[in-house]
Image (cartoon, grey):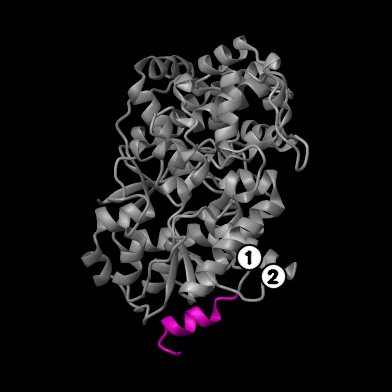
Amino acid sequence: MKKIGFFLGCNIPFNRPDIEYSARYLLNELGVEVVELEGATCCPAFGTMPSLDLVGWAAASAWNLAIAEEKGVEVITGCGSCYGSLNEARYHMEKHPEIKEQVNIILAKVGKEYKGTTKVWNFINFLYEEVGLDTLKSKIKNNLNGLKCAVQTGCHNLWPSRAYPTNEDNTFFPKRLREICEAMGGVAPNYSTITDCCAMGALRSTASEKSLALFKKKLDVIKEEIDPDVAVTGCSSCLLQFDAGQALLVEQKKLNYKIPALHIAQLTAIAMGADVEKATAMASIPLNGVITKIKGGN
Amino acid sequence: MEEGGVNVIDLTQGDESFVRELIALGADELRECIQCGKCAATCPMALAGLEFFIKRIVHAANLGLRDVLLEDSSVWGCQSCNRCVEICPMDIKPYEVIQAVRRAAMKVESCPANTYEGLRNLYRFGHAVFPKGFEERRKKVGLPEKPPTALSFDELRKKYQEVLKQTILEEIAPFPLD
């Protein structure tokens, strides 16, 4: 693929622009032109339009998808919610032509049309399928040097599988992110709670303590079973929980260890030689050990 | 529900018209639920200890327990993770029951305050999540202060607002759409 539309969403450009920097860097290194989706908005997030009405949700997503269609590009996003919301809206419109019809009546009033011709990727599937592990390997400047990764694919990157154009062979035993980390020279063992939710998102906003307690259970299992150097997420919301959420648990004295965390776009960009300061600028949990290991130290 | 007490459902509270409302709002396979509990075994809300997780929500929905569902905030804690949709043996799409309950709740303004905040941000800025201080964070990584989204293009943002105004948001937003 020579070019792709970069769907930013909200959390990446506003809370974690270090992921945006990393994503732009890695796409550039892969020779993929980043096409700006000017005027794009929130996907929309599940707690907004999708919680109001199906047609309203579809119309808000179709606004974004239509921008990509006008530019003749497929779309990539680093946020699981964006990946889910856009793909699910697309699925609903494909399955129910009457919804698509109503959406197009709405869009026509602002001179737009949703055709249904674009495709929405996440970074995991893009790297795994579109780029391919061999090409990815050939672009690595800093081998991960045995870095032990605990992968967190993210709920929306897996389910509902019927809404996604491509997916894992078994969504309850995801392997793609592990294989990506390993292709770059890392080690990415399986662990028993690998598909468990990070508890960020609506749960964190509605029941913060319960959300963090559930997240801690997952962290404890990761620590006990594989004791990784880093957690690697496929979703920006998971990263917020693994990084800032984990830092909060430490601050509240509910956690007595720290597992540094990176989004897969950040880890890949660093492996491809990105500016480490920029690629990790917003991290709450220090990544010094991770960077030292990647650069060849212990 | 009383702590440690026995849960007795008062079936006289059941309202059949509420069941029909939920079905019309997207829970179209609601009646097919057999309460097998597979959804509960994977639901993050259940694992986190929310009293009202997916299986119970679907049960209450099927009984038409309007007040129970609209007074409890659990549906707003749903992660939209769709594990329940993936594994439901009856394919009732339990998550769509959650969405239907939320849609019914929005109509009677029974939702957490942050839901309105998200909607207001979505309408005003084109972004539901719109935290302060992003300009500095973006500058730190060498990116322009504003991303090239609707935030940077007034005319496109107005067009997006025109799109939202033609949706149900126009009827239920507790803030002016202008």
Is A105 placed left or right of A186 in the picture? Answer: right
Q: Chain of mark 1?
A: A
Identify whether B148 is placed above or below B61: below
Identify whether B39 is placed above or below A114: below
User: Callout 2 environment at 10 Å: few (<14), some (14 to 19), or many (20+)?
Assistant: some
* Residue drawn at the location 32% of the way across and 52% of the way down: A125
- As measured in the structure, the alpha-carbon distance from the residue carrying label 2 to the one carrying label 1 is 6 Å
Kindly check if marks 2 and 1 are in contact, taking CB atoms under 8 A apart as contact.
yes
> In the rendered structure, which amino acid carries the disc numbered 2?
Val
Quick check: is A296 in the magenta stretch? yes
Quick check: is A182 in the magenta stretch? no
Q: Which of B171/A191 is in front?
A: A191
Residue on which disc 1 sits: A246
| Rendering coords of residue A17 (x, y %) | 55, 58
Name the secondary structure under disc 2.
helix
Identify whether A5 is placed above or below B126: below
Identify whether A279 is placed above or below A126: below
Tell me, yes or no, if residue A114 can be seen here. Answer: no
Question: Is the residue at mark 2 from the same chain as the one at mark 1?
Answer: yes
Q: Residue furthest left?
A: A134
Residue on which disc 2 sits: A250
Per the rendered image, the range of residues in magenta is A286-298
| Rendering coords of residue B105 (x, y %) | 67, 23
